[in-house]
Image (cartoon, coloured by chain):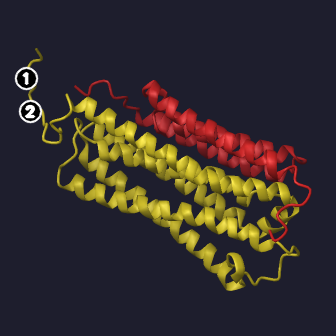
Amino acid sequence: MSVHHHISSAKFLWGVATSLFILTFITVFVTWIHIPEPWNVVVAIGIAVIKALIVVAFFMNLWWDSKFNVLLFVMSIAFFLLLIGITLLDTLYRVDPVPSF
Amino acid sequence: MAQPSVTEERLEHLKHYFIDSDQQFEASKMGMWIFLVTEILFFGGLFLAYIVYRTWYPELYLLASEELHTFWGAVNTVVLIGSSLTVAMAIRSAQLNQIKGLIINLYITIGLACVFMVIKYFEYSEKFAKGILPGAHYSYEGIAHEKANIFFSIYYMMTGLHGIHVLVGIGLMVWLVFKAKKKVFHSGYYTPVEITGLYWHLVDIIWIFLFPLLYLID
């Protein structure tokens, strides 16, 4: 019993954290070299997404987890993107945004 | 049949309606993931507000984020990633029956979480002193944009809700330390450590997005 829980080695966990520290440095570094609009936003979000996926996969152990838990996570992101997409279809194309806002 | 092990297997945590410890563990973990889904959508609404207002007032975000100190935002990012590491190490310690290591890692995590909140406290009080308050209470004159209060309303809602999550996490970790000291956890039962860890990593992920979105605009 409880033999197949995934146990990460200390070395592996330090490696994951180190990669996150390096990506944090890179995301600050790219603001110094001033990438032109809109690519600065794309790079910043891209790095954040990579960092988040590393945390989800190797700290939250979704990499070794049941497919159902992976599905839960993927669906939450899918519905979040749907929320953004449908809302932007409205707000991006308004002639006059809500006047008092 | 399995041979009786040298160390007697502890099963006092096992509820009668589960077949075995594994089934109980997997059920708890799935329940936590469902909760995390609701958390993602909870913060998702605020991220959406951020996106809608950024598409409406892109120049406001450029101006207003100059008031935020990238250095302290970066320090807090490193602090939270470090605390995610120590939580992962705490879970590893529990899996290996190293209860002392579990408690030490939880203490370091609590310490890092407190460092995060102290830095946040100084950031907030510096802004409050300048009159940068949310919504109608905003009175700062230093940003040449009539909607400047909107950026900071979003800033306070997002970082405030995140900060509340950090405080809840500190409370949960203190509770874990008490339980660990009472020798409740062992390699066959560490479910509360595992699911608190999942929660803590999600709080880390939210900050991973908040940092570039709020501090790194320029």
Q: Which residue is labeled 1 in the image?
A: B4
Q: Amino acid at mark 1?
A: Pro
Q: Is residue B81 visible?
A: no
Q: Colour of chain A?
A: red
SS assignment at label 2? loop
Q: CA distance from mark 2 to mark 1?
A: 7 Å
Q: Quadrant of the C terminus of chain B?
A: bottom right
Q: Which residue is labeled 2 in the image?
A: B8
Q: Amino acid at mark 2?
A: Glu
SS assignment at label 1? loop
Front residue of this view, candidates B42 and B151: B42
Front residue of this view, candidates B44 and B195: B44
Is the residue marked by circle 1 packed among few (<14), some (14-19), or many (20+) residues within 10 Å?
few
Q: Chain of mark 1?
A: B
Percent x, y of residue A11? 45, 35
Percent x, y of residue A35? 87, 47
Q: Identify the residue shown where x is 54% and y is 57%.
A: B79
